[in-house]
Amino acid sequence: MRRLALALATVVLLVLTGCTGGTSAAGGFVSGDGTITTVPVGQRVPAPEISGTTLEGEPWSSASVNGKVLVYNVWGSWCQPCIKEAPALVKAAARTATSAQFVGINSRDIGKPQAQAFVREFGVTYPNLYDPAGELVLLFAGKLPLSAIPSTVIVDTQGRIAARVLGETTEATLVGLIDDVAAGR
């Protein structure tokens, strides 16, 4: 059992440090450089089905979202770029509420209280899944990996990965990407 836990931790570390811009002095985590990857419609691959428990203890599954663009944001309450981008995510989610469903994936927080405090502080109203071991993040490996914290991936209405941002993003970037994906581009 200990070997399995160590192996999983190693895989998570490798995935999270894969294609990033470097190590931050604040916290020793790997942060992205804001690189945006868009996938042409004909080259998109199916996104993994994501399901888990929200920070409020409720079950959530991507299978319950129909007809909307899905926006996953991987974050941690300890992550300075996540703190900086949180207001932009909240605003983008509000601006695109009719066409997109935002979902946070809280990664590497030691406990739920820190993550819950983050969500309260920034007024985050969309669901946030608790993923302390990074198991949900690993589901994207081999597709378009979420190899930095924060990372944001956008899934089209057919359930295919359409875009990814490695590192901190902005409201304008997210709204533009969501609008393009919602329009079938």
Image (cartoon, rainbow, N blue to C red):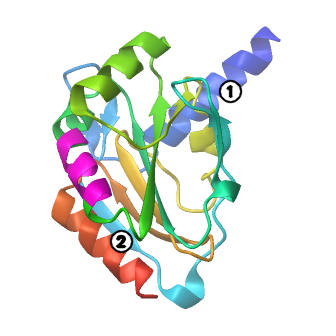
- Give the image quarter of residue 66: bottom right
Residue identified by numbered label 2: 178
- Give the image quarter of residue 84: top left
Q: Is residue 178 left or right of residue 23?
A: right
Q: Is residue 91 magenta?
A: yes
**For the residue labelled by badge 2, is the local secondary structure a helix, a strand or a loop?**
helix
Q: Taken as a whole, is the magenta stretch helix, strand or loop?
A: helix
Q: Is residue 164 above or below residue 61?
A: below
Which residue sits at x=26%, y=68%?
Answer: 175
Q: Nearer the viewer, residue 66 or 118?
A: 66
Q: Nearer the viewer, residue 101 or 144?
A: 101
Residue type at mark 1? Leu
Which residue sits at x=30%, y=25%?
Answer: 120
Residue type at mark 2? Ile
Q: Are marks 1 and 2 in contact (CB under 8 Å)?
A: no
Q: Which residues are magenta?
A: 86-94
Residue identified by numbered label 1: 8
Q: Is residue 48 above or below residue 13?
A: below
Q: Quadrant of the C terminus?
A: bottom left
